[in-house]
Image: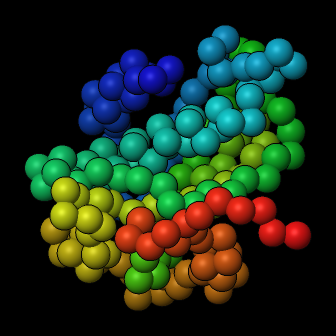
Amino acid sequence: MHLIIRTLLLLVTARRRPALGIWDSSSLPLRVLPTDIDIAMHVNNGMYFSLMDLGRFELMVRAGVWDVFRRKGWSPVVSAETIAFRKSLTLGQRYNIETRIIGFDDRAIYFEQRMVSDGEIYARAYIATRLVSAQGPVANEEIFTATGQQPPADLVLPEWLHEWRENNALPSTRRPAPHRWVR
């Protein structure tokens, strides 16, 4: 909930920025706000993922696919994500969230996102996403057809990302996932 106002504002303002294709990279300029930081006075590690949501929404709006998703009742969800930190973003600092789709497989569309300030990467994340409807997950081919944005022929998901998602996946919601620690 803490980013709902920023998200709603972004959904409006992104429409005023130049259009992009969904396979293009987007760059969202932001500044570290007091609500983004923790007791150490830098962006909280969990906040990076919330802020990166803004970057993905911005790309979807500018690429014209957000309205298609909403009309069809499709909602984006994250199925897996990983991040590496290099430097801390601090209160008041200007930075950009750089976002691009780097590939897909039969279960997910993968984004690479970077927090960049003064030309330097502060953090980098890889996010596996899906679209879901009331009937369940939406197939990638259905997404590409509905948006009219077929993937470029040279877009190949790095094998390590596919393996990462497979190795970290939890069972489907149709299968049990009992909690027990294994040594």
The image quadrant where one finds the C terminus is bottom right
For residue 150, above or below residue 154: above
The quadrant where residue 137 appears: bottom left
> Is 162 or 147 nearer to us in this picture?
162
State how many labels appear: 0
Give the image location of residue 87, x and y in percent: 86, 39
Horizontal side of 31 relative to 130 (left or right) equals right
Give the image location of residue 14, x and y in percent: 34, 35
Q: Residue, x 83% and y 15% (percent of image)? A: 39
Give the image location of residue 2, x and y in percent: 50, 20
Outermost left residue: 71
For residue 157, above or below residue 36: below
Residue 161 is at least partly visible in this image: no
Give the image location of residue 20, x and y in percent: 34, 54
Q: Residue, x 13% and y 55% (percent of image)? A: 72
For residue 12, above or below residue 97: above
Q: Residue, x 68% and y 42% (percent of image)? A: 115
